[in-house]
Image: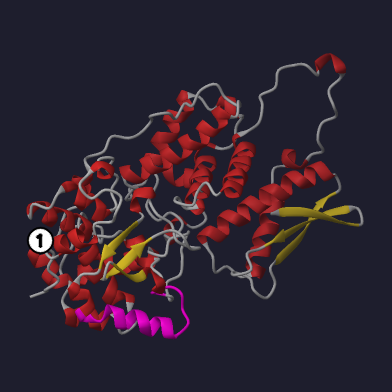
Amino acid sequence: MAYLIKRGALYYLNLKLPKHLFPRCHTLRLSLNIRQRQSALFLAASLAQQVHIHLNEHPLEDLLTLRELCSQWRDAAPTQTIQPAPRKAPAATVNQPSDGPTLATLSKLYIEEGKRGGTWREVSTHEVERTLRDLFELMGDMPVKAFDVQQARLLKDRLSRCPQYFGLRPEYEGKTLKQVVESGASYKTITAVTVNNRLRKLSAFMNWCKTNGYVADNPLMGLKVMTGSAKEARLSFDRHDLTILLDEAALKVEARKHPWRYWLPLLGRATGARLEELCQLRVDDFIEQQGIQCIRIDDSREGQNLKNSSSRRILPLHPALIELGIILHVESVRATGADRLFPELEAVRGKLGHAPSKWFSRYKSRQGLTDPKKTFHSFRHTLIDELRNAGVQDSLIKRIAGHEDSAVTFSIYGSRTPLKAMAEALQHISLDSH
């Protein structure tokens, strides 16, 4: 968080940077060339926000370059933003109505309260913060009461035109998100599902504003773009797809660089678990219950997040995984002292599955599978489809997949995890690539 120091008559920005990005020197100090404290505070906050955005897009930036950028941003700041605060209004005008707090002010309070309360244990704080940054980049800051239904519709339209991988593509460097959106250029936009996810997160913020009495209504309530069904968005793999994707020789070649390239597709096929659930597995998540070797999908440890409470589950290990040596691999990782099954994975914007997702997209293309609707998540659809085709009870399928099902509580399984029934159901899933 930015704060000020004063040297002589001038104020300086004194910004603490993330230690994991700047281990040797993690303080950025820069003269603001300002004598008035209020003006200095305003400029310092603006610079801190720009640094935060820049580091999210360029996490490998060196300190010298970052300092030079700050100097440029400082010198380019509009004159009016660094003027002294106006004098207090005379008594006759003190009671005039105010526009109230701005979206930026309230978003800061919202984030701070959410972090204190552990609100986003299941939803990455990074995603909430990024979504709020998108709001300000696309719409600018404004009094919260000025954000009405017209502004909400405009936001939805601009979100729908956001490019994919904005912070990673070189052609967007030096441009703001709003400049790209309004450029009229042709590019691949984020999906409708992504737009609606961001609208939901922003709606949650506006609900918080309403609950705390800052606005009377939430203009984002129920606002979303029309989408096809989830089944249309992702396709299942067919037998040929599985044969080429799970080819043991091909996977072993891929695993020469990273072991997770071998195990993740096999785990995805055998469990139907989400990619992020698999990437965050720990060695102590491989357990034995009721005499059955199992995997625990949980969020009890730091760095583990689940989509929802129904995602918390225990799955029997497929016998084919044991035959392929998954338990031996777990023990070899444990012997190194590592906690996570895939310790070489590093989180990007809070997601350990970032690199595996990119790799799998390249891998399936090299194997001749180019349909964009077939992704790692297709393993999940495939497993669910095959279990249904085999006549497995729907409530049991939902247990395996980690889907919410209010009927499960009153099913024949009761509160005891039906591991034996789940193990029998998973026998219908074949890992044979031939």
The number of numbered badges drawn on the structure is 1
- In this view, 220 is above or below 227: above
Residue 192 in the image: state x and y as whole percent.
31, 42
Q: In this view, does 400 lie to the left or right of 222?
A: left
Outermost residue toward the right in this view: 8
- Dominant secondary-structure state across the stretch colored magenta: helix
Residue 71 lies in quadrant: bottom right
At 27% from the left and 62% from the top, the residue drawn is: 315
Q: Where's the N terminus, which quadrant?
A: bottom right
Residue 432 in the image: state x and y as whole percent.
11, 74
Element type where label 1 sits in the image: loop
The question of residue 84 being in magenta is answered with: no
Residue 83 in the image: state x and y as whole percent.
79, 39
At 60% from the left and 32% from the top, the residue drawn is: 142
Residue 326 lies in quadrant: bottom left
Amino acid under disc 1: Asp
Q: Where's the C terminus, which quadrant?
A: bottom left
Q: In this view, does 353 lie to the left or right of 96?
A: left
Specify start and end residues of the magenta stretch as a single range.
323-342
In this view of the protein, which residue sits in the foreground, 189 or 21? 21
Q: In this view, does 242 lie to the left or right of 44?
A: left
Label 1 sits on residue: 238
Residue 277 in the image: state x and y as whole percent.
35, 61
Q: In this view, does 191 lie to the left or right of 388?
A: right
Can the viewer see residue 339 in this picture? yes
The question of residue 330 being in magenta is answered with: yes
Colour option used: secondary structure
Outermost residue toward the top in this view: 92
